[in-house]
Image (cartoon, helix red, strand yellow):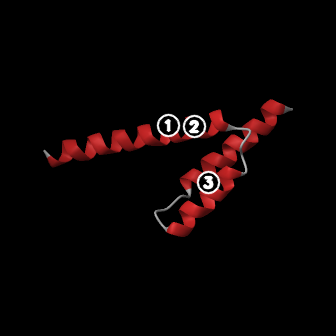
Amino acid sequence: MGFWRESVQQKALERKVSELSNSQQSVQTLSLWLIHLPKHPVLIVSMWERELQKLEVVKIHCLADVR
C-alpha cells in the first residue's frame, strides 16, 4: 500500500509542478502543498532535480541558438 500511495503522490506532484507558473500565488500554493508531504522528501527532491535538469537543457539550447 505504501508504494501505491507514493505513486499517487508522485503523479500529483508532477501535475502540480507542471502547472507551476512564476506568479507568487502559484509558488505559494505549491510550497504549501509540499509542506504537507513531509514523509516524502526523496520524492520531492528527485522531482526538483529532474525539473532543474530540464531547465539546464533548455538553457543550453537557448545559448546554442544565440551563438
- Cα–Cα span, label 3 and label 1: 15 Å
Q: Which residue sits at x=52%, y=41%?
A: 48
Whole-percent x, y for residue 4 in the image: 80, 35
Residue placed most toward the observer, 2 or 19: 2
Q: Do the residues labelled 2 and 3 touch (CB within 8 Å)?
A: no
Q: Quick check: 56 left or right of 29?
A: left
Q: What residue type is labelled 2?
A: Val
Q: Which amino acid does label 1 sit on?
A: Glu
Q: Are marks 2 and 1 in contact (CB under 8 Å)?
A: yes
Q: Which amino acid does label 3 sit on?
A: Lys
Q: Quick check: 14 left or right of 21?
A: right
Secondary-structure class at tag 1: helix
Secondary-structure class at tag 3: helix
Q: Quadrant of residue 27?
A: bottom right
- Residue extending farthest to the left is 67
Residue placed most toward the observer, 23 or 3: 23
Q: Please count the marks in the image.
A: 3
Q: Which residue sits at x=30%, y=44%?
A: 59
Q: Which residue sits at x=35%, y=40%?
A: 56
For label 3, the residue is: 16
Q: Mark 2 or mark 3: which comes first in sequence?
A: 3
Q: Are marks 3 and 1 in contact (CB under 8 Å)?
A: no
Other-residue count near label 3 (Cα within 10 Å), few / some / many at <14 / 14–19 / ≥20: some
Whole-percent x, y for residue 54 in the image: 42, 41
Residue placed most toward the observer, 48 or 35: 35
Other-residue count near label 1 (Cα within 10 Å), few / some / many at <14 / 14–19 / ≥20: few
Whole-percent x, y for residue 62 in the image: 25, 47
For label 2, the residue is: 45
Q: Quick check: 64 left or right of 37?
A: left
Which callout, 3 or 1, points to the residue nearer the camera?
A: 1
Secondary-structure class at tag 2: helix
For label 1, the residue is: 49
